[in-house]
């Protein structure tokens, strides 16, 4: 189907699609991680963010087969894995914790720990890890569910 064909669809017939099922999947980093900075509107803290684009390679045995059948093909489905670094001296503990989480994630991808961080980020492309997909309800509307990658591990 393309969008021009969809124009004849009645709005009442458009349903919310299922969310990718929870469970463990094999994921592959598809491109160089994106680096950006932003300021939180809630607390005024400036953050640096490192975002990995991951593509699903395959589900593990713990993913419900009925949920997979309802969702459809998961291979190639994209997800993001982001690490947010709170800047400023008051946030050093959080910054250090996030840095360690990033190091551990790169280790799960099989990146050589003797590399500098920038080299490690570049070396992450096309590497794979196991990642747990979980569901998180939208805080302002619990009917909306987001799928996100939580814990990761080496394959």
Image (cartoon, helix red, strand yellow):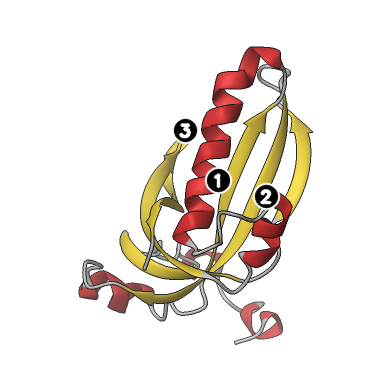
- Disc 1 vs disc 2: Cβ atoms closer than 8 Å? yes
Cα separation between marks 1 and 2 = 9 Å
Of pointers 1 and 2, the one earlier in the residue sequence: 1
Residue at the image point whose x is 38% and y is 77% from the top: 58
Q: Nearer the viewer, mark 1 or mark 3?
A: 1
Of pointers 2 and 3, the one earlier in the residue sequence: 2
Quick check: 154 above or below 99? Answer: below
Helix, strand or loop for disc 3: loop
Helix, strand or loop for disc 2: helix
- Disc 2 vs disc 3: Cβ atoms closer than 8 Å? no
Cα separation between marks 1 and 3 = 26 Å
Residue at the image point whose x is 37% and y is 73% from the top: 71
Disc 2 target residue: 117
Most extreme residue toward the front, as rendered?
114
Q: Which mark is residue 122?
A: none
Horizontal side of residue 99 vs 59, given as left or right: right
Q: Nearer the viewer, mark 2 or mark 3?
A: 2
Of pointers 1 and 3, the one earlier in the residue sequence: 1
Q: In the rendering, at what x and y percent does residue 134 appear?
A: 36, 52
Q: In the rendering, at what x and y percent does residue 130 appear?
A: 38, 64
Q: Which mark is residue 102?
A: 1
Q: In the rendering, at what x and y percent does residue 40 appear?
A: 70, 26
Q: Nearer the viewer, mark 1 or mark 2?
A: 2
Disc 3 target residue: 139
């Amino acid at each position: 189907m393309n969008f021009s064909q969809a124009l004849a669809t009645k709005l009442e017939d458009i349903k919310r699609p299922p969310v990718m099922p929870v469970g463990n999947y094999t994921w592959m980093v598809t491109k160089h991680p994106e680096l950006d900075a932003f300021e939180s509107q809630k607390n005024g803290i400036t953050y640096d963010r490192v975002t990995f684009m991951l593509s699903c390679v395959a589900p593990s045995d713990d993913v419900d087969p009925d949920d997979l059948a309802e969702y459809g093909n998961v291979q190639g489905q994209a997800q993001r894995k982001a690490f947010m670094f709170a800047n400023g001296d008051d946030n050093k503990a959080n910054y250090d914790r996030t840095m360690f989480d990033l190091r551990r994630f790169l280790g799960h991808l099989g990146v050589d720990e003797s590399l500098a961080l920038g080299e490690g980020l570049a070396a992450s492309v096309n590497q794979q890890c196991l990642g747990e997909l979980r569901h998180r309800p939208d805080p302002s509307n619990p009917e909306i569910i987001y799928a996100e990658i939580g814990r990761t591990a080496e394959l």
